Image: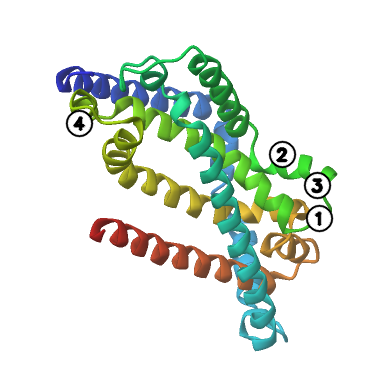
Amino acid sequence: MISSKKRSHFIGNSFWLLILLIIISWISIFFKHERDIFAIFNSENSIYLQKFVKNLLGIGKEKVAYLDPKDWKVALKLSAQTFVMSIVAIGFATLGMLIFVFPTARNVVSGELTYRSKWYYWPLYYLGRFLFLIGRAVPELLWAMILLYLFKPGLLPGALALALHNFGILGKLVAELIEDMDDRPIKNLIVNGASTLQVFLYGLIPELMPKTLNYILYRFENIIRASLIVGIVGAGGLGMQFRLAMSFFRYTDITLYLLCYLIMVYCSDILSAWCKKFIRVS
């Protein structure tokens, strides 16, 4: 285990390195794109922005979508489909992550954590790491475009695209969580004769569950937002309607769909808070 002094020293150095990279990046952007930066604030762009906002609000329009109950009914139905797609996606991603995550933690396969190591652990380690890498390296949009060649447009390819990308992200995060966990309770259980199942149930799960749940809920919120992107390429839900509204310049429809996304994110916040409360109580 890394000592707290070394860990704090590493975090401090990483922080200042990050600040230095940000400063260098902004200096590079300023000198190479100075004209483009100042062009953002010219009067012509201000006029375009005001016109765009007026169109979103429906000022001067006869029909305003976000004030029409019928349009709200259709949009909420699509929102429910998108929410279901997001739940299916995080479910697939979590299930896949749980299957591969323990063999991809270095302290597990080496026997450092559990004092148990088998010859086939290392092939599983490299296989799992490779799958996590492929999953998170390919963006959701590209996964959706690939899967749309295999399936017809709809919610299934969208859910699978979101699941594959977040499978890779969750796998990496939770594997690192296992590698950084305090191994003293696990080793105490093993020394006292606990079986592999007992170590898993009474050592690993209580230690990993709260942070793993936080990661899962955070990625669920990201999936809801990313569902707009995969929907744009034909994966169904609100994203597909958002693309059509943009294509036909139906600005008040865009406002309606954005409000629906706000509602979904708010609902995901409520669900996250409820899940965290349930875990703390239990």
Q: Are marks 3 and 1 in contact (CB under 8 Å)?
A: yes
Q: Nearer the viewer, mark 4 or mark 3?
A: 4
- Dot 1 or dot 2: first in sequence order is 2
Sequence-wise, the earlier of marks 4 and 2 is: 2
C-alpha gap between disc 2 and disc 3: 10 Å
Residue 113 vertical position relative to residue 218 in the rendered view, above or below = above
- What residue sits right under mark 1 in the picture? 153
Residue 192, percent from left and from top:
18, 27
Tell me, yes or no, whether the two marked residues, 1 and 2, touch with CB atoms within 8 Å. Answer: no
First in sequence, mark 4 or 3: give its number.
3
The crowding category of the residue bearing disc 1, from other C-alpha atoms within 10 Å (few below 14, some 14 to 19, many at least 20), is: some
The quadrant in which the N terminus is found is: top left
Whether residue 269 is situated above or below residue 162 in the rendered picture = below
The residue beneath circle 4 is 185
Asked if residue 222 is positioned above or below residue 13 in the image, the reply reads below
Circle 4 packing at 10 Å, graded few (<14), some (14-19), many (20+), is some
Q: Nearer the viewer, mark 2 or mark 3?
A: 3
Q: Nearer the viewer, mark 4 or mark 1?
A: 4
